[in-house]
Amino acid sequence: MSRLPITRTAAVAALLLTVSLLLWVLPRGAAPDGTPSCTGRRIASWSTDTGHTVAFARYGDDNTRVDDWTGGDGTHSVRLPDGRSLWLFSDTFLDRVQPPPNPQGQQHRWRTADRGGTPYLRHNSLVLMSRSGRPERTLTGGTAAAPGPFFPDPPGGGWRWPVHASVEPRTPGSREKVVRVLLWNRAPGTGPWIFGVPRGTEVATLSLPGLRLEGITETVGQASVADPGRRVLYGTAAVTEGAWTYVFGGDDPPSSPASSAYLARVPAGRLGDRGRWRFWDGAHWQRRAGSARPVLRAGGRRSVGSAFTVVRDDGGAPAHGGTPSRAKPRVGDTWVLFTMDTGGAGTAGMRTATSYWSCSPRGPWHGPNGRITPPRPADADPQYVAAYNPQVHPGFTASGRRLLLSYDINWLGPAPADPRLNGNVELYRPRFLRVRLRP
């Protein structure tokens, strides 16, 4: 009898055994393109963080000054080299807080301008936090008599909203540090564009330690994209891994809360260098922003909100967010994205957060995984109180992988929002959670 059939059978059996062993030892999520493998993450538990919530409430209620922060949204933060922290806010109230009852007779603290009339609302502000974790000063533009946004409105109208911030060398290799702040430039709009028409992404440079605004440059212009709903604004999150800073962005379709996530990368420490930005097209890094393709495409249950956050988690060490690092990627690092559950049913997109994970910023992204429905302040019409814009603050990650996650509060009822927001200061202030992840 020929030995050939036995030899083939043995070879096939050995091959199957080898493949089985490889599949067994490779962690879930290993990518075929050489991306390091990792273990998936999901939300294990969460709890309220009263320390940060109360700290900002106390600061907002303090009438020692009446030209400082009493509320805002778009909450981001960055640790400064001297131990202080800089908090960045989009639309910001600058005014006086009055004790209850409010003009509607409800037991809420309420806002009023120092000299009567409508409280000051400016498009952005910065709040400086002390080393001990106490908000202590609001940074604005304009004058003392007429405070304006810290990042001035662009010529011709519109506004700037700050998003991610990083401490970087002033120039490559320099020992002098500056703060780079990514900004969203928006033009006034009507109808579905009540929150502004996307125009582009900019980078501002702030001096250290004085935090003086030195200049603003455009890095990703979008005016040439005819459909505003397809314009991508970058900077909702940025994470440095090895020699690169990966900058995440999203489009802004006006007819849906569901957005797609996009990815760019810049050499670490070079956020302000427009010529060094590259955009992921699904297979390669391209110079043209118009070549970008989603790394997480909206559809069905999968999507992101226009503002989301990303961290890199190794299951034990502090999360990586804004501080440039030359450390090489580690096998086992998992990228975790937090967003509002815009693909969920009903009002989940304005009430509930969820997460995705990946072994690479390019994806594939797995999820949604887990749910967080955070507490909201009391209101006579609670169905109109929105909790949105989850943001992880890596500089405040506690031991045991307890991430600090902020979320913003707003009132989105059918009537004009200003009377409700002014009548209850809790409706426009960030709140905070501690979130644990697990495999």
Image (tube, rainbow, N blue to C red):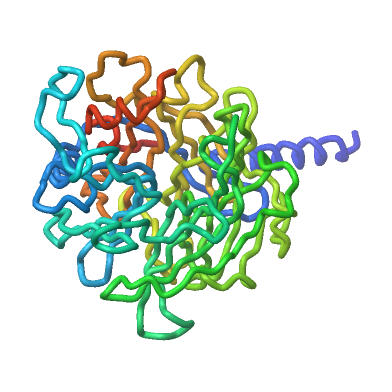
Residue at horizontal 17 percent and vertical 50 percent from the top: 66
Residue at horizontal 34 percent and vertical 75 percent from the top: 207
Residue 63 seen in the figure:
yes
Residue at horizontal 47 percent and vertical 27 percent from the top: 341
Residue 21 seen in the figure:
no
The C terminus lies in quadrant: top left
Along the line of sight, the residue nearer the viewer: 430 or 380: 380
Residue at horizontal 45 percent and vertical 21 percent from the top: 348
> Residue 19 lies in what quarter of the image?
top right
Question: In this rendering, would 388 be left or right of 47?
Answer: right
Residue 58's spot in the image, x, y percent?
12, 43
Question: In this rendering, would 109 be left or right of 371?
Answer: left
Residue 262's spot in the image, x, y percent?
61, 47
Along the line of sight, the residue nearer the viewer: 422 or 284: 422
Along the line of sight, the residue nearer the viewer: 16 or 95: 95
Question: In this rendering, would 344 be left or right of 180?
Answer: right
Task: In the rendered view, tell whether residue 273 sits above or below residue 391.
Answer: below
> Residue 8 lies in what quarter of the image?
top right
Residue 95's spot in the image, x, y percent?
22, 45
Along the line of sight, the residue nearer the viewer: 25 or 92: 92
Residue 107's spot in the image, x, y percent?
13, 21
